[in-house]
Image (cartoon, rainbow, N blue to C red):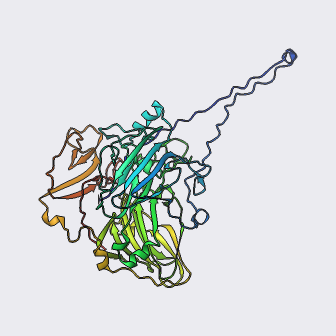
Amino acid sequence: MKRRTHLIALTFLALLALAVLCLRIGQKTSAAAAKQPALPAIAKQTPTPTPAPTPCPFVPIDPVKYGNKPFQNPPEIRSVQGRLQTTLAVKYTDPKTTMIGGCGVTLRTYNGQLVGPTLRVKPGDVLNILLDNQLPVETPDEAAAQVNQEASNAFINTQPHSFNTTNLHTHGLHVSPVGNSDNVLLAIPPQTQLPYEIKLPANHPSGAFWYHAHAHGSTAIQVGSGMAGALIIEDDPAKIPATLREANKHEKVLVFETILYDAQGKAQDITSFFPDSPPPAPQPTPCQQNLPSCTWNGSLRRTTINGQIVPIIKMQPGEVQRWRMIDAAFRESIFLQIRKQGSKSEGIAFNEIALDGIYLSKMDTWLPNQPIDLEPGYRSDALVQAPLARGRYELIDASSLTTKLGVGLRGTQEEEDVLAYIDIDGPRLEMKLPTSDEIAKLNPFPGVKLYETADGVQEAVFKLGSAVDSNTDGRNYFQINYAAFNPTHVRYLQLGAIDMWNLVTIGDPPGIQPPGNAIPPLPHVFHIHVNPFQMQRQDP
């Protein structure tokens, strides 16, 4: 079972302490009452504790009742005269005003919203962002419990931060990684602030990037709460074809998120989106047992777009919209298709023009039966042209059974899901798509094929498991080429050299005993910051 993915994730399990308050009820007796005949003794009864309310039960969410609202782009913040200035307040949402499927949630977010604002800048701009961590300081017991939540007993050589410690990463930007720039090694504790200053090079490529929390040890639970947003480096209108300029006026930003929350509407541990164990006795959750049901679909929660459940995107016949799609989901593969409602074959094509923020060397047309594969962290810019016939279409997260991969991110089969409706109505628009040649001219590295000039080749197989060597102590180790990862080992690479790296992630083979002990392919095993690279692919 092999898988290539991009995601930053650590899996930790939380402990929940329940307190039962017992009331002692006393009786008063008077002297007169004491002379009366003794009453039969009544057996002492222990009051039955009232079950804690579950405002967010693990049940299917009705998209008709809780969706069907007009699509909304995230709020925008633009640079002015070469500088973007803003504050990102890291704080809990108010469950009285922030709902998901009718459930009030208390989640770590930027500015109290389920998706961060879209930041819009130009090449050469400076981002001045004050990151204000307003989350509460955790007690020593809370922090200690978080450190000890690794259910798989994986051997980790670093001490995680508390879940309320954070920082900021601008994903995909080619900027300085030190100081108060895009420094993922910074740790901003609760009730503190840090002013970021991130300088974009004047020749930085335009495109769709994103930002998110990246403190090691709290990344997954914070990104899984919605601490992510789009970062758009805008095109120079004079350098793009007129057809693309027009499509940009009809732009949609779609940030896909799998927001974690438990039965109380909180994300207190990284498996918060899985149903509690059935009564009467506490049992390990599906993720603690590494069961196939340890998937997003198994939680019965719904993938959101900009914090919305199944919004309605409106288009006019013939209209061309630019969709900037960002998979900010926690551990979730998304296979995107647009199909006519009620049809398995008729749909709308995606005309992909950029991948991970970089314009392609051609326009890739993905037919309705060819899903676009988005893994966590991936971005895809596609032009969507509405057909001339009016009607309702659906943006589908296709079943993994219909894809070439055959499985989702965790190596399991997943059912399809409706993410949004596309309603086509109104006057016809005479809009055209750019040609493939016009898109090719926007590629910042035309004709570059680094693999043809690679100086060396290396193979890397990533795995989490216990089979390290004959001296294994029973713990699971993060492994590279079947040897335990050693964080003290430093590799020195030649400046300017070009290598070809073949990367693979594998899971345990079938038949691991006892059942449930098999570990699937890790969802995010490799990541590059700062250094440029070129990835090869085939398709559509």
Q: Can residue 35 be seen in this view?
A: yes
From this viewpoint, which residue is outermost toward the front?
Answer: 81
Q: Where is residue 83 in the image (x, y as percent from the top left)?
A: 40, 55
Q: Which of 489 and 508 is in front in this view?
A: 489
Q: Position of residue 68 (x, y in %)?
A: 58, 67
Horizontal side of 441 relative to 251 (left or right) equals: left
Q: Quadrant of the N terminus?
A: bottom left
Quadrant for residue 174, please give it: bottom left
Q: Work out whether 307 lies above or below 109.
A: below
Quadrant for residue 505, please give it: bottom left
Q: Nearer the viewer, residue 286 or 386?
A: 386
Q: Which of 236 and 338 is in front in this view?
A: 236
Q: Nearer the viewer, residue 406 or 486?
A: 486
Horizontal side of 69 relative to 190 (left or right) equals: right
Q: Work out whether 96 lies above or below 431.
A: above
Q: Quadrant of the C terminus?
A: bottom left
Quadrant for residue 399, please give it: bottom left
Q: Can residue 8 be seen in this view?
A: no
Q: Position of residue 38 (x, y in %)?
A: 82, 20
Horizontal side of 257 relative to 34 (left or right) equals: left
Q: Work out whether 335 lies above or below 133.
A: below
Q: Where is residue 218 in the image (x, y as percent from the top left)?
A: 41, 44
From this viewpoint, which residue is outermost toward the left?
Answer: 455
Q: How many labels does the image show?
A: 0
